[in-house]
Structure formats: structure tokens, C-alpha cells
Amino acid sequence: MAVPKQKQSHSRTTKRRSQHKLSAPTYNACPQCHTPRRPHRVCPTCGTYGGKTIVSPDHGHDHDH
């Protein structure tokens, strides 16, 4: 079984862990309405994807429960 010969220093450990961080989500402009949206998803503003209307845009919460 492989065992380290030397103890790894705190500096080396923190340098390795410095890459363990979350990145901000990417946003692209919608080709129809030019609002920011996540890539490969239906635009929440205009409801289009790939040049076609997929869902009707939801502009308010005036539906009954």
C-alpha cells in the first residue's frame, strides 16, 4: 500500500484546496428578447427556445388555486 514519505505542509494543502470553489453560473443573451438567460434553457421572459415559442411567458401570478 502506498504511504506518503513526508507530511504534506499546510501551505501545499491550502494551495490545492484553493481550487475547490463554486463558480458563478453563466448567462447568455436570449436571441429573441436579448435578456440574460441560462444556456440550453427556455427563456423565462419570452418563452422561446431555438427560435420557437415553447411556453407562453408568465408575467404575473393572477391564477386561481
Image (cartoon, helix red, strand yellow):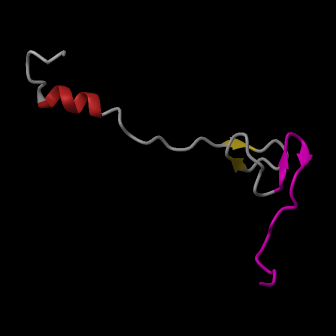
At horizontal 21% and vertical 33% (from top left) the residue drawn is 14
Name of the residue lying farthest toward the front: 1
- The quadrant of the rendering that contains the C terminus is bottom right
Q: Please, is residue 60 above or below residue 32 in the view?
A: below
> Where residue 46 sits: x, y (%)?
83, 56
Is residue 53 found left or right of 58 in the rendered image?
right
Q: Nearer the viewer, residue 41 or 5?
A: 5
Q: Please, is residue 1 above or below residue 61 in the view?
A: above
At horizontal 14% and vertical 18% (from top left) the residue drawn is 3
- The quadrant of the rendering that contains the N terminus is top left
Q: How many marks?
A: 0
- Residue 31's image quarter? top right
- Magenta residues, as a range? 46-65
Find out whether residue 6 is within the magenta segment: no
> Where residue 49 sits: x, y (%)?
83, 44
Find out whether residue 48 is within the magenta segment: yes
At horizontal 59% and vertical 41% (from top left) the residue drawn is 26
Is residue 45 found left or right of 8 in the rendered image?
right
At horizontal 30% and vertical 34% (from top left) the residue drawn is 18
- Residue 19's image quarter? top left
> Where residue 21 sits: x, y (%)?
38, 40
- Residue 62's image quarter? bottom right
Is residue 16 found left or right of 25 in the rendered image?
left
Q: Nearer the viewer, residue 5 or 34?
A: 5
Q: Nearer the viewer, residue 16 or 26?
A: 16
Is residue 6 found left or right of 44 in the rendered image?
left
